[in-house]
Image (spheres, rainbow, N blue to C red):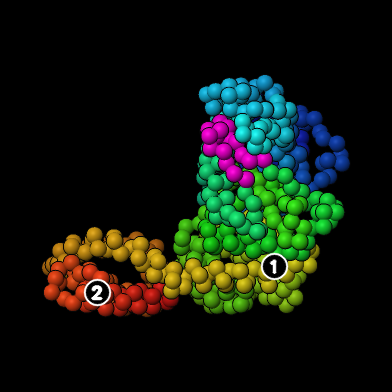
Amino acid sequence: MRSLPRLLRIAAVIVRYRLDDVVDDAHRFRLLRWARLFVRRVPADVASLPRGKRLVLALTELGPIFVKFGQILSTRRDLLPADIADELTALQDKVSPFPGAEARAAVESALGASIEDRYSYFEETPLASASIAQVHAARLADGREVVVKVLRPDIATRIGRDIDLLRALGELVQRVHPRADKIRPLAVVAEIESTLLNELDLQREGANASLLRRNFLDSNDLYVPEVIWSHTQVGVLTLERVRGIPVDDLATLDAAGIDRVRLAEKGVQLFYTEVFRDNFFHADAHAGNIWVDASRPHDPRFIVLDFGIMGTLPEKDQYWLAENFLALFSQDYKRIAELHLRAGWMPAEVRMDELESAIRTVCEPYFTRPLSEVSLAEVVVKLFQMAQRYQLTVQPQLILLQKTLLNIEGVGRLLHPDIDIWATARPVLETIWKKQHGPKMFIKRLRQRVPEWLAAAPDMPQLMHAYLEQVTSGSLQLRIASDDLRRIEAHSGHSARLAVPLVIGASLAIGAALLQALDTQAPRWSGLSLWAIGLAVGAIIAFFVAHRSR
C-alpha cells in the first residue's frame, strides 16, 4: 500500500496528458476516462500534440527514473508503435545536480580514502548530471586530467521502489491485456530492471569501456577514453578526460574544417566492425554520446562516451544476421527467406514461397529507388515488423541492434544527407565476413578445439560401443518435442548435406588422435605421426566443407 500514492500520481499524469487513449487500446482501462472529471487538464496546445510527444512530457513530469525507463523502452521497437518509439529516443536524461559536497563524500566512501589522497584537484560543480549519476572534473596526482562519475545518493533504493511499482503494473497488464502473451509485460519489466541494475555498477561500465578501447586501440576511426582502474569502484568510475565537438553541432564541425562526408562513412563502417568483427557494440550511440576529435579535420575520428549499455549477439545470431545483410545487399529474397527459416526466426511451418513473397513485398518498393535514397535501417525495421505478423517473438538483443542501426544511420545522414549507406556498408561487411569465416580463421578455431578432442578421444570408443549396443538391443530412446519435429522436417535437407562431411571429419579426427597416442611405430615428423597428420588434414578438409555448406 506504500506505493498507492505513487500509483495514483502516475494515473493522474496519464489522464492529464490524455494518454488514457493509448493505454485503452484493449478497452480494459475505461476507469481512466472517468478520472478525466477529477484531473486538471493540460493546456490545449499540449493536448493537441501527437501522442508520442505527450508521452515524453508525461515521463519527464514523473521524474528522472521514468525518463530512464522511457529511454530503455525505446529500444523495444517490437513492442511500441513507430511514432511513440521515435519520440522516446529523444528523451533527455538531464536532471538537477545534487550538491558537490555529497558527491565528494560518495567518492571518498567508494574509494575508501579522502579526495586529497586520490586526486590533486576535484571540482565540486558537476560537468553533467543525469538520473543515475553525475560527472565531475578532477586531476590525478601525476597531473592527468580525468572525469569522475559518481552515483546519486540513495539511487538504488529509489530504483528498487519504482521497479516494484512497474512490476505491479506489469502483472495487471499480464492479467487483462488480450495480447499479453506477445507483449510479455513482466519480461519487459525484468529487462528494464536488469538494464538499470547494470547501470548502477560503474565498475561494469568501466569494463565495457576497457574492452571497447582495446578493440580500437590505435584506431584512426574511434577513440575510447582510458579507464583509471586505481580510482574506480562499483560506485565511482574515473576516466581519462577527453574533449571534442558534439557530433550534432554541425556549425562547429564546419568551422573546424571537419570532413563530414568522410566522418559519416566512418560511422557506418564502425557499426559493422563493432557488430561483426568484435561482436561488442555501443548500443546507446545517440548524438549526445558521440563527439568528434577536432585535432584531425581531414581524417576525422569519433570519440565515444557512456558505456552503460553495450550489445552482444549469440554467435549463431551473428552469423545469420550477417548472411541476411549480405543477401539483402544482393536483393536475394529467396536467400533471405531461407536464412530466416534456418535461423529459427520464423515458425518452421511457414512455407518458403509464402515467406519469399512477403519479403519481396517489403523490399521491392525500396529497391525501385536509387540505393543512395534508401534507408537500410528502415528496410530492416520493416522486415522485423513482417516477422511479428507471423507471431514470432524477436530476441531483445536483435531489437537493440536494430535501434543502434537506426541511431548510426541517423548520425550518418545528419553529417552527410546524401550518404549511400548500402555502398558504404557492403564492402566493409564482405571484407570482415571473409576474414571471420575464411580458411585462416577456420584453422585457428580448429586448433583451439583440438586439445578438447584429444582429451575426449580415449572415451570415444566406449561411448560409441554403448551407443551401438542400445541401437542393436532396441533400447535407444529419442525424445523430441513436436516443435522440434517440425523444425527437423523444415531443415532435413540442410542437415543431410551437413551430415556426411561432419561424420567423415569426426571419424578422421578421432583416428588421428588415436594414431598419435597409440601408434608408437609410425614414422614421425617433429614428434607427430605422419599417419595422424594425414588423417588430421583430411578431417580439416571435411570440416571446412561442412562449414561452407552451413
Name which residue type carries label 2.
Trp
Q: Quadrant of residue 147?
A: top right
Callout 2: 10 Å neighbours few (<14), some, many (20+)? few
Mark 2 against mark 1, which lies toward the viewer? Answer: 2
- Residue 450 lies, with reference to residue 74, above or below; the image says below
Residue at x 68%, y 60% (from the top left corner): 267
- Location of the N terminus by quadrant is top right
Q: Kindly state the secondary structure of the residue where label 2 is placed.
A: strand
Residue at x 35%, y 78% (from the top left corner): 541
Q: Which residues are magenta?
A: 225-241
Viewer can see residue 338 = yes
- Residue 171 lies, with reference to residue 389, above or below; the image says above
Expressed as whole percent of the image width and height from the top left, the position of residue 333 reads 58, 76
Viewer can see residue 25 = no
The one nearer the camera, 352 or 23, is 352
Expressed as whole percent of the image width and height from the top left, the position of residue 443 reads 39, 70
Residue at x 86%, y 36% (from the top left corner): 43
Numbered tag placed on residue 525 in the rendering: 2
Q: Earlier in the sequence, mark 2 or mark 1?
A: 1
Numbered tag placed on residue 421 in the rendering: 1
Q: How many marks?
A: 2
Q: Is residue 208 left or right of residue 510?
A: right
Name which residue type carries label 1.
Ile
- Location of the C terminus by quadrant is bottom left
The answer to whether residue 487 is magenta is no
Expressed as whole percent of the image width and height from the top left, the position of residue 402 reads 61, 58
